[in-house]
Image (cartoon, rainbow, N blue to C red):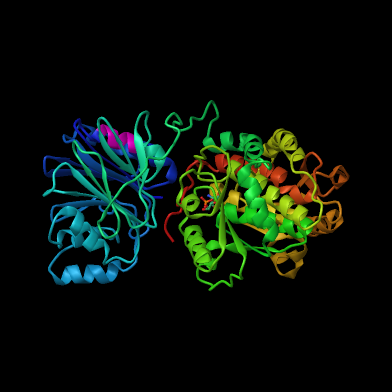
Amino acid sequence: MCGIVGCVMARPAAPLLLDGLKKLEYRGYDSAGIAVSDGGAISVVKRKGRVKGLEDARALKGGTGVGHTRWATHGAPSECNAHPHCFGGICIVHNGIVENAATLKEECVRRGETFSSQTDSEVIAHLIAAEEGDLLTAVRAALQKISGSYAVAVLSERAPDTIVCARRASPLVVGCDGEGSYVASDIPAVAADGRAVYVLGDGEFAVLKKGEPPAFFDGALTPVKKAAIAYDACADTPQKQGFPHFMKKEIAEAPQSAEQSFPDLQSEVYSALCEVLCQTEHIHLVACGTAYHSTLCMYYVTHRFAKMTAQPFIASEYRYMDPIVPRGTLCITVSQSGETADTLASAALAKARGAKLLAVTNVKHSSLERMSDFVLPTHAGREIAVAATKSFCAQLAVLYALSHTIAQCRGHQAPPVSPLFSAMREALAAGEKVRAWVPYFVGARSVFFLGRGADRYAALEGSLKLKEVSYLPSEGYPAGELKHGTLALVDARTPVVALITDPAVADKTMNAVHEVSARGAPVFLITTIPACLGCAEVTACVLLPACEPAYSPMLTALPVQLLAYYVALACGNDPDKPRNLAKAVTVE
Ligand code: M6R
């Protein structure tokens, strides 16, 4: 999604802004730009496409500037829609959505103003330019008129060497060191050795001025004191380390990510949480996309072993469904980024209705972490590829641990999770066989992933992954549901991936294999059950190590992720940066 960088310093800002934008590239974007102020006059360079297209801006003079990577929401990716947007001596970069932009624009047009983009963001520059008073007061007054979400950084020709920043429901961090002050939409873009970093709270403002430490204000513009956060300054942007793509590297890191994320059950944090888990009668699981699939897996395991319903919800639905939150509800939110707008809004709603919040997230100091009562971090390390891979397995490790604890609290036994970690390593090696399946998928009309029980949820994730990076239409489906309509779609051009890890229902899923094969579909089997290998109707198969079937998505995720990766390559796609998608979905 969109990214913001900015700095106020004595040396030229442009090189630092361009480097900062490069650190934000992994988030996904389609245009980029910078604005640099040299003692008042502001120069703007923006382009459709990659940050490298801005190299001619490196020579801009001036130590104060802002930069942006844009992921189009309102208006196509283009140079004029790229940020920064300037009007009346004001220049802004914005992440978020101005929901009442149309109404606000009408007012500006009535005043005789013209707009040079189709974006919702440009109106912010117009609103600020229309305000009286100093820049901070003007920014506050303008933002009060906006509904929606924002992280903004603002330059003004009338306030040289100054950036005013503000946020509502979109992250922003501020840094400072001996050289100057900095702002960015995520910590890695601002982090540096010896630099203090502060997280701006929701509704807060910051003023960055040359030669002064950053000043922070609450929504009423009362100064607030902030403590610098502890962060790992050495944690550079990860490198591919010899892998051709981040996606491949991150799939390879999945076993380690899962193992490292399995919580220390003896720790103080986990013991405190354990008490809450043992008392709770109602669990809501809230997430989006891949993280939602991990909550489905937890739902299944909790049902199976703890004999309890932990109810999974898609966050974008939960926030608008007027959810019933009974007394004593624990709301478990799962998010790799910790910044997904729908997940944050759902968490806020559940909290307002009395739920305790437990966040399972991969990003320290994220908004989700900061608003939650309890946090169980996943230790997957930074995930750069847009497709979630290692973070899914890390989430499963944490969520299975929770289910295990809930089962114990309720007097039931759940099988141990730890044998999964070494099995994942074997599954990763075995999964490489899927590379040979690729010719059957390239050019396919549609692809089905089938399974029952826990396999059904891994099928959903396999299908999402394939769609995301190969752009092939695909569905994850409960194997028993096929003949209730979907079978009509199956023919020789619809490869089917069957996941079979539970001996109790293996024959049933095999029936689905026979049904699709009878309609000419090539069938690819991923199984932990050697007896399933003999089926003559199967085109090719991968045998994974035996495991507790309820936990099997932790293993089956690996070959399906690899399949998506190899098919994406064969289709000529960049698996790390799938079209139209962003790593952190910070807008609705
Ligand atoms: O950062 P989050 O885990 O909250 O993100 C949720 C989804 O946007 C994310 O899992 C998305 O579905 C993945 N890119 C899929 O690979």
Q: Nearer the viewer, residue 244 or 229?
A: 229
Establish if 194 lies above or below 215.
above
**Which residue is painted at 32% across and 54% down in the image?**
204
Q: Is residue 87 visible?
A: yes
Establish if 236 lies above or below 208.
above
**Which residue is painted at 41% across and 50% down in the image?**
1
In this rendering, would 5 be left or right of 464? Answer: left
Q: How many marks?
A: 0
Magenta residue span: 15-20
Was residue 18 drawn as part of the magenta stretch in this picture? yes
**Which residue is painted at 28% across and 69% down in the image?**
102
Establish if 159 lies above or below 212.
below
In this rendering, would 103 be left or right of 284? Answer: left
Residue 292 percent location from the top left of the image: 60, 56
Q: Is residue 446 visible?
A: no
Q: Main secondary structure of the magenta part?
A: helix
Residue 130 percent location from the top left of the image: 15, 62
